[in-house]
Image (cartoon, helix red, strand yellow):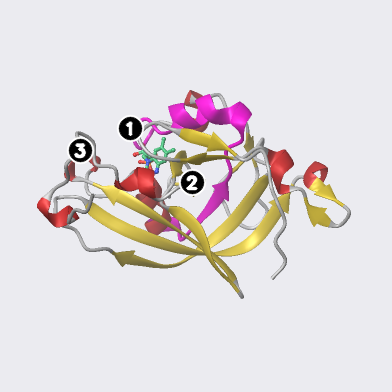
Amino acid sequence: MFYEPKKGNPFKIDPFKSLVFPRPIGWISSISKDGLSNLAPYSYFNAVADEPPQIMFCSNGSPSHGKYKDSLSNILSTKEFVVNFVTSDFRNQMNISSKDFKPNEDEFILSNLKKKKSKLVNAPSVKDSPVNLECKLVKTITLKSNSKKISTMIIGEVIGIFINDKFIKNNRVDSVSMRYIARMGYSEYTTVTSKFNLKR
Ligand SMILES: Cc1cc2nc3c(=O)[nH]c(=O)nc-3n(C[C@H](O)[C@H](O)[C@H](O)COP(=O)(O)O)c2cc1C
């Protein structure tokens, strides 16, 4: 099968996201100028550079979001945010935090998650995330859009890194024991449970 996305696709559901997987989930916490916390998962997310460490995620807002989703609105006004990670035990809370809540509704409270004060930014961290990446906004890039969607890539510099000590063994990070979940297509997810080594 071959198709050109701009001419449509032969499926009932656009399969694009089930072809690029597993996508890590950046669970982005931010705070508004008025001090209201916000938390939402983004799987158009990844690490993109390491000197200095930088991450990106993409927000696909539409007119129903009042142009931008809350995370992006907060980040544009405060220039900072935290990337948290979803472990298998917290999949339901992650799912609740993805609901389209109003800007004045705090997803930490609605999804019953504990906040932790971040060290270098005002946005709170998710206490039960094995890792918190405290970020400063570097830039936003408006992506191409064929629809009313406004797709914005947000690039952040990681200025502070918390790693729960229980995941550090022999001076290395024991990634698999964190049980991160990642997104596939449709409503499918996977959990990272195995690894193998391949020396370059
Ligand atoms: C696992 C998962 C991944 C998601 N990834 C994205 C994404 O990459 N970009 C996006 O715009 N929305 C994504 N969403 C939807 C947002 O989480 C949702 O629109 C949320 O309400 C946005 O919250 P905010 O307005 O507080 O930023 C995802 C949802 C789930 C459950």
Residue sitting at 38 percent across and 34 percent down?
104
Mark 2 CB within 8 Å of ligand 1? no
Q: Nearer the viewer, mark 1 or mark 3?
A: 3
On screen, residue 154 above or below 13: below
Crowding at mark 2 (Cα within 10 Å: few <14, some 14-19, many 20+): some
Query: Contact (CB < 8 A) between labels 2 and 1?
Result: no
**Where 190 sits versus 149, above or below?**
above
Q: Position of residue 184 (x, y in %)?
A: 43, 40
Q: Which mark is first along the chain, 1 or 2?
A: 2
Which residue lies under the disc numbered 1?
100
- Relative depth, front residue between 42 and 106: 42
In this rendering, would 135 be left or right of 104? right
- Please state which of the two labelled residues, at mark 2 or mark 3, is closer to the viewer: 3
Q: Residue 177 sits in which quadrant?
A: top right
The residue carrying pointer 3 sits among few (fewer than 14), some (14 to 19) or many (20 or more) residues within 10 Å by Cα, namely: few
Asked whether 48 falls inside the magenta stretch, the response is no
Compare residues 62 and 110 and report the one nearer the observer: 62
Residue annotated with mark 2: 22
Q: Which of the two discs, 1 and 3, labels the residue nearer the N terminus? A: 3
Ligand 1 within 8 Å of the CB at mark 1:
yes
Q: Amino acid at mark 3?
A: Phe
Q: Label 3 near label 1: C-beta < 8 Å?
A: no
On screen, residue 165 versus residue 41, left or right, reads: right
Question: At which x and y percent is residue 103?
Answer: 35, 37
Q: Which residues are magenta?
A: 77-104
Amino acid type for the residue under numbered disc 1: Asp
According to the picture, the residue beneath numbered tag 3 turns out to be 11
Q: Residue 200, located in which quarter of the rendered image?
A: bottom right
